[in-house]
Image: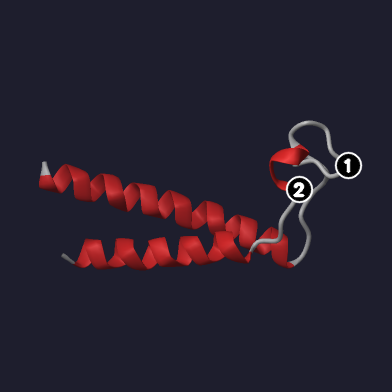
Amino acid sequence: MILMIIDALVAIILIASVVMQSSKSSGMGGISGGTDTVFSGKARGMDALLARVTVVFAVIFAVITLIIAKMTA
């Protein structure tokens, strides 16, 4: 039960960290060679922090979700 609550909180933080990141491309148009591509450079400042937070919480979310799945199976 407590793991499900922690998983939900981690999911909310993960969603917030993704939504707060600035856009790095012009959507699907960036794939076809637009002026601003996905690989246009390194993130700095707040974007770098949000990128790290996103990765950390994504890993935490995946691990907790797998633990919950193993416990219920």
Q: Secondary structure at mark 2?
A: loop
Q: Secondary structure at mark 1?
A: loop
Q: Residue furthest left?
A: 73
Q: Residue furthest front?
A: 29
Q: Quadrant of the C terminus?
A: top left
Asked which quadrant contains residue 49, the reply is bottom right
Give the image location of residue 19, x and y in percent.
58, 63
Give the image location of residue 47, x and y in percent.
71, 61
Q: Are marks 2 and 1 in contact (CB under 8 Å)?
A: yes
Asked which quadrant contains residue 7, the reply is bottom left
Q: Which residue is mark 1?
A: 35
Q: Residue at x 76, y 48 (%)?
A: 26
Give the image location of residue 65, x and y in percent.
29, 50
Residue type at numbered disc 2: Ser
Q: Residue at x 39, y 63 (%)?
A: 10
What's the distance in space between the residues labelled 2 and 1, CA to CA? 9 Å
Q: Using a 10 Å C-alpha cutoff, classify the residue at mark 2 as few (fewer than 14 neighbours), some (14 to 19) or many (20 or more).
A: few
Give the image location of residue 12, x and y in percent.
42, 66
Q: Quadrant of the N terminus?
A: bottom left
Q: How many marks?
A: 2
Please indicate whether residue 59 sits to the left or right of residue 36 in the image: left
Q: Which residue is mark 2?
A: 26
Looking at the image, is mark 2 or mark 1 earlier in the sequence? Answer: 2
Q: Residue at x 83, y 32 (%)?
A: 33
Residue type at numbered disc 1: Thr
